[in-house]
Image (cartoon, rainbow, N blue to C red):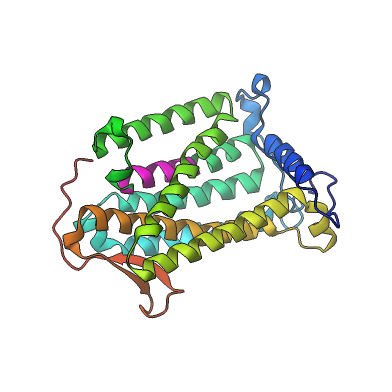
Amino acid sequence: MPIGNHKWPHKVNCTRILRIFGEQINDSLSIEFTRATMTWEHLARGSSPVDWCEGNYLISPDIAEFVNTISNILFLLGPPFLIYLFKDYGRFIQPAIHLIWVLLIVVGLSSAYFHATLSLLGQLLDELTILWVFMATLSLFCPRRHFPRIFKGSRKRFSLSMTLFSIAATALSFYHPAINAFALMFLAIPATYLLYKELKIVEDQRVYRLGVRNTTILMIAIVCWINDRMFCDTWSSMNFPYLHGFWHILIFISAYPACVLFAYFFVSDERPESRPTLKYWPRNDFELGIPYVSINYGKKCDDEI
């Protein structure tokens, strides 16, 4: 259903855009701490304060936002194939790589549940699974040279602190749902910065090009998210209130290559003898295919994590 009465102006006022965007974010996070405590009523359909531009129950009487629900299909179909492509990486370098792909499946299921029911519980599950994907990726694959000094280069200590942070954020978000948004920003901003830093020094131009494409797709996805959230009336007048569904598709196309890139940075930094190579399926010379990291040589990782 349409959110707000915001029209696309002929001349965009940046201050007004930021104000409206802040209001929409505030609504979507249910930030009213005195009223945000989870109760049983938040299991009910429609209990979330977030309602995207797509009309509710227009296609199916059982699914609130039909397109926003089924657009999560890539999160369910892609990871099993990535598990297959990364079988050597998991065997010789880091078995926990498969945890990332499983978590992406959980993200898709949680997002589908949220958009099908528009319940606050669904909203929290959707946001929390994204938080855990960030946590797992950074814990497993962040190069040690980027660790804060307090961890003294220990991945075990770094991963433990990240896990404890995520557990605390998860527990607190059920008491105050707004907390999860701050936890997401706490992990997402450093992750984006680390990706930028690694791309500045990477020598393999195929890896660099993947990073550029990944960032470009992410920017397009964010534009879709903002337009669906802030300019719903405009898109509804054109009979196309489905930009959030495109966000789901584009964010998956952006998210899994980011995980691939961090997996490449990790093995290049800590297991260079394995001669990692960024490859593409089904054809290695087709860079719009599915990227994965090929391991040419190496023994099983004895990392302390």
Residue drawn at the location 42% of the way across and 79% of the way down: 286
Q: Is residue 202 above or below residue 190?
A: below
Q: Is residue 178 above or below residue 206?
A: above
Confirm whether the magenta stretch covers residue 139. yes
Is residue 71 at least partly visible in the picture? no
Residue 268 pos. (x, y %): 26, 58
Residue drawn at the location 38% of the way across and 65% of the way down: 81
Residue drawn at the location 50% of the way across and 48% of the way down: 107
Residue 168 pos. (x, y %): 44, 27
Confirm whether the magenta stretch covers residue 117. no
Q: In this view, does 154 lie above or below 235?
A: above
Residue 151 pos. (x, y %): 28, 32
Picture quadrant of residue 117: top right
Image side of residue 87 versus residue 286, left or right: left
Give the residues in magenta.
129-141
Picture quadrant of residue 121: top right
In-front residue for pair 68/160: 160
Image side of residue 271 versus residue 186, left or right: left
Residue drawn at the location 46% of the way across and 74% of the way down: 288
Q: Residue furthest top?
A: 34
Is residue 88 at least partly visible in the picture? yes
The kind of secondary structure the magenta stretch mainly shows is: helix
Residue 35 pos. (x, y %): 68, 22
